[in-house]
Image: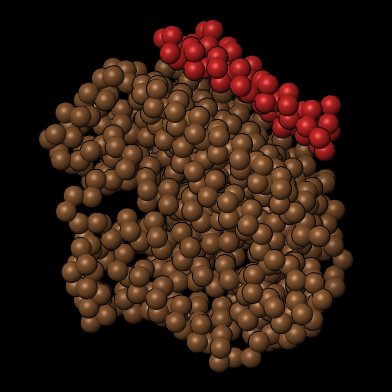
Chain colours: A brown, B red
Amino acid sequence: MKLGTIDWAFIVWYFALSIGIGLYYSKKAGRSISEYFLSGRSLPWWLLGTSMVATTFSSDTPLAVTGIVIKDGVSGNWFWWNFLLGSTLTVLFFAHLWRRAEVVTEVEFIHLRYSGRAAEFLRGFKALYLGIPVSCIVFGWVTLAMVKIIQITFHTSGIAALAVCLSLTVFYTTLSGLWGVVATDMLLFGVAMLGSIVLSVVSVEKAGGIGTVVTSLKALSAQTGKDYLSVFPSFGQALPLAFFVAVFIQWWAVYYPGAEPGGGGWVAQRMLAARNAKHAVSGTLWFNIAHFVIRPWPWILTALAALVLFPGLARAPAGDMEASYPRMIGCLPAGIMGLVIASLFAAFMSTIESIVNLSGSYLLNDFYRPFVRRDAPERHYVLVSRVLVVIVALLGAGFSYVLGSVKMGWQLIMELSGGIGLVLLLRWYWWRVNAWSEIAALSSSAALAVYLKRFPDSVLVRGLSSGLERAGFRVDAWGTNIILIVAFTTVVWLAVTFLTPPDDTQHLLAFYRKVRPGGFWRPIARLHGTRYRLQAAPFAGWALAIVMILCFLLGIGRIVFAGFAAGAAYLAAGAAAAVLLAGAINKIDWEGQ
Amino acid sequence: MRKDYLPMALGFWGVAVPLVAFGVFLCRTAAERITVFVAAGIFGPVGYFISRAKQ
């Protein structure tokens, strides 16, 4: 496809706006580490929530969702919609605790919560592990998706365009810190959504309107035997194990960047940067609404329209299914095409800037500062942070260049940390969890994942598979592996917890005093003199948040397919849940006084 | 006008204005025009609310 002058004008204008906004904050960011990585802990809920969703809206996300919808229909999205359960759990039970902890990074929490040499080892290890390999894989995944988009839209390798885009993003991110990241994220998310909505409208129109799309897909369903339009999967004779694992296990057990059990990564970074605990809670709730309700429908509509326009896609390889999203850009008129391409750059940049800032924070705050050079002036640390951000960006770019199959590496990372979710949740609410619990969970999860990769047909796998088949499941390797990893990891870390001594009492007391968690802290609460209890309202709030988001998601889904009465009913139910949720949130004492 | 949020507000207005121009001069169909005008109608007020937000 060919871009006209007006398309280029919009792309250049958009880049100028983003860079201008980023650079405006560079002076503010240079004052201290707290300003550079946490915006001086002054972010309001709307800014931090939008920044979270802008980061999760990456250049690969619309492609991945398009691929899912073309392969499995709308219901295929439960593969990631299941994370709603864990994300809303974070809103009601963890966001305020993160803010009260007042650490700089997720990894520094280890130093606050645990004591002794094991804790220091764990902190240093996680700083390097999350700061380099995990960040590079995310960087590589996102960059490869952008390369694919550029190749399809410009019919060139696009390396020069990508290099310019990466350099500009890293340039303003290095100078402006988290302030620049969240401020540009506001605009980037707006432009990314605008582009995806415009593309979906034009695609559906091109396919003959929504009525034709529905009729054509029903006819296609009759041929392929797949229901493309249903939001819920049809189970047939047996329950798919992957669906069971997604809905009942994955959201609390698997460490998935952007949906970490109890919060982590860039989600935790923004909760830590909130103005106060209530802003952290409200911002994370807004993130969930935008993430699950606002983002997906334009992508789904574009995918369905592509399926109508190119019915051969239903039997195409997975790569072609995903590539149909950028291919639809060819349907756009001059001017609008530039806007949509700019929107994909926006999605790319918003993720890249967050990754490099976050990995810089791990390497500086949890490795360089505690283990390489303590007690240096703040200006020195800010300078080192900027250097680290550039190094991580260079490593990530190099990694994406040599990466053949990121997806395999990505699945491996998920399996390696497949069973650690429970320990990450309980470390807030159970005094007995110690650094060894986390080390045991990490190492046993990784060890079993490697074993299962090496011996995919072992006795363990065969035994569990046949048992599950007898119980009526349609078994797959991913689901079986996750069940094995979670069960094994949980037994190991619980055993290690009881076999090793608890953390130093004074250390636990200081943590309890500062974070004020409820739950199982009786021995420490007795020493403290005050016992913080789990309130009932967060449990009700959790249920209401799930109902609200599901109703909004389904309501919009009905309305876009012209089911106005059912859509309005869902939206009304969602609004009622929202009112009750607001009441519950206002009732809770988020500061824990 | 709040100083910290001003660049973000300007960014939203900086997108809203070209969108109006798109809608007037470049959109071919009613659906495209409505989408672009609705988007411009959202970006403009969002910029205003950001500029007035509490620091």
The quarter of the displayed image where residue A330 is located: top left
Residue depicted at 80% across the width and 72% down the height: A530
Residue A302's spot in the image, x, y percent? 36, 30
Task: Give the mark count.
Answer: 0
Q: Is residue A519 above or below residue A24?
A: below
The residue at the point 61 percent across, 40 percent down is: A580
Q: Is residue A30 visible?
A: yes
State the image coordinates of residue A225 (x, y, percent, origin top left).
15, 40
Q: Nearer the viewer, residue A322 or A237?
A: A237
Question: Of A523 and A338, which appears nearest the observer?
Answer: A523
Quick one: A351 or A283, which is closer to the camera?
A283
The N terminus of chain A is located in which quarter?
top left
Q: Is residue A341 above or below residue A246?
A: above
Residue B36 lies, in percent from the top left, at 52, 17
Task: Give the left or right position of residue A483, taking residue B20 as reference.
Answer: left
- Side of A508 relative to A231 (left or right): right
The correct choice, above or below, for A233 with respect to A557 in the image is: below
> Which residue is depicted at the point 43% across and 9% down?
B30
Q: Residue furthest right?
A: A377
Give the quadrant of the C terminus of chain A.
bottom right
Q: What residue appears at the point 40 percent right and 60 percent down from the top-left corner?
A: A248
* Residue A356, horizontal then vertical, whole percent: 62, 55
Q: Can residue A123 be seen by looking at this rendering?
A: no
Q: Residue furthest left?
A: A223
Pick whichever, A417 or A426, lies toward us.
Answer: A426
